[in-house]
């Protein structure tokens, strides 16, 4: 699309905004308008990326990367990478796709003569982390309060590429709606197809202990509001947050309901984490730092069935 056509597209969008305002529908149009402006530059090379995991986490997954060369390069859009992994998760596939996009830029920017690249993703994890990782890197790949970040090795790989490309290319990552254009649809299909034919090992992926909460609420587990409490918990999932720290998701016993209900997450070291198992109940002592909740001690443990039976029998 030439510059005149692109400007006409923006003008048409502005007219749509004016018409929509008169009938009170701008809330649905405004986000689309600003997303369109973000990817409008016809000279930029646009790279759609996507990742998928079929049985997240722990199932096979894949990634897809598609390049649209823009008006300055006489080449049509093409898928430049698709790759399937045996065991992984959604976030790692999305992040690996972003890493490959940077590798592709590193290998091709000089030959193409292009200097502006826009990476388009529907992953809020990749989009948000792309800005935050600069601070994480300065803090030893931890948050400002010391919480370990997920997938630190992959973020380190991405930062290495960003430093290498700093003076050679201008790279932006933009968040777009899922399957919002043909490029997004194609990488979505490509990532899913790659996940059905895995041939790579996702080194660094730790499957952890995977189970299901008793509470079927779709609400995600929140950081536990640690203030020195001694809650009774039922762990149902764990991940390695870093080499020495594990992240546990658990439900907390509710005396009034006589069941495990609210879902939370907290960190602990390997010595304690290796003693926390599914289908067991523990009373634990928490630290008093809600921004970085940690399990400091296991006070006692019981089989879940025995604990629940005792409480049901209690009048």
Image (cartoon, rainbow, N blue to C red):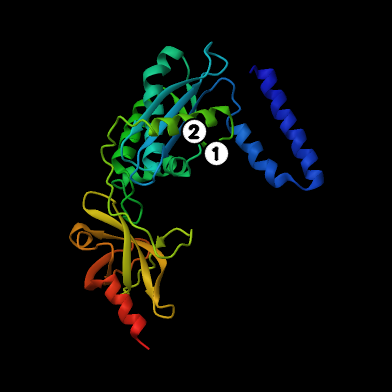
Q: Which residue is mark 2?
A: 188
In this rendering, the answer to whether 36 lies above or below 220 is above
Q: Quadrant of residue 42?
A: top right
Local packing at callout 1 (Cα closer than 10 Å; few below 14, some 14-19, many 20+) is few
Per the model, the C-alpha gap separating discs 1 and 2 is: 9 Å
Residue 193: image location, x then y, percent: 43, 30
In this rendering, the answer to whether 271 lies above or below 122 is below
Residue 230: image location, x then y, percent: 30, 75
Local packing at callout 2 (Cα closer than 10 Å; few below 14, some 14-19, many 20+) is many
Residue 138: image location, x then y, percent: 32, 44
Depth check: 91 or 126 in front? 91
Q: Is disc 1 in contact with disc 2, using a CB cutoff of under 8 Å?
A: yes
Depth check: 277 or 239 in front? 277
Q: Residue at x 67, y 23 (%)?
A: 6
Residue 108: image location, x then y, percent: 40, 17
Residue lying at the far bottom of the rendered structure = 315
Q: Residue at x 36, y 40 (%)?
A: 92
Point out the tag, 1 or 2, that comes first from the N-terminus.
1
Residue lying at the far left of the rendered structure = 271
Residue lying at the far right of the rendered structure = 22
Q: Is residue 125 left or right of residue 204?
A: right
Task: Say which mark, if any, is on residue 178.
Answer: 1
Q: Residue at x 51, y 28 (%)?
A: 186
Q: Residue at x 56, y 20 (%)?
A: 43
Q: Quadrant of the C terminus?
A: bottom left
């Amino acid at each position: 699309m030439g510059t005149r056509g692109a400007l006409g597209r923006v003008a048409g969008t502005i007219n749509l905004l004016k018409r929509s305002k008169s009938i009170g529908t701008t809330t649905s149009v405004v986000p689309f308008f600003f997303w369109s402006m973000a990817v409008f530059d016809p000279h930029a090379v646009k790279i759609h990326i996507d990742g998928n995991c079929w049985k997240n986490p722990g199932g096979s997954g894949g990634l897809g990367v598609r390049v649209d060369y823009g008006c300055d390069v006489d080449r049509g859009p093409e898928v430049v990478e698709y790759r399937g992994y045996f065991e992984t998760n959604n976030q790692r596939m999305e992040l690996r796709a972003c890493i490959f996009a940077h590798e592709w830029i590193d290998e091709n920017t000089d030959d193409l003569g292009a200097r502006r690249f826009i990476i388009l993703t529907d992953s809020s994890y990749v989009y948000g982390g792309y800005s935050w990782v600069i601070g994480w890197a300065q803090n030893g790949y931890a948050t400002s309060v010391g919480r370990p970040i997920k997938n630190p090795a992959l973020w380190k790989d991405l930062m290495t590429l960003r430093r290498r490309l700093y003076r050679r290319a201008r790279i932006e990552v933009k968040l777009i709606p899922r399957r919002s254009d043909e490029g997004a649809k194609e990488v979505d299909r490509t990532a899913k197809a790659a996940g059905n034919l895995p041939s790579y090992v996702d080194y660094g992926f730790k499957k952890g202990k995977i189970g299901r909460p008793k509470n079927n609420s779709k609400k995600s587990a929140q950081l536990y509001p640690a203030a020195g409490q001694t809650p009774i918990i039922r762990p149902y999932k764990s991940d390695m947050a870093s080499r020495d720290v594990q992240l546990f998701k658990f439900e907390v016993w509710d005396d009034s309901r006589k069941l495990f209900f609210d879902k939370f997450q907290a960190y602990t070291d390997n010595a304690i984490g290796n003693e926390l198992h599914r289908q067991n109940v523990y009373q634990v002592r928490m630290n008093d730092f809600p921004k970085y909740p940690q399990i400091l001690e296991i006070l006692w443990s019981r089989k879940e069935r025995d604990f629940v039976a005792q409480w049901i029998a209690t009048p």
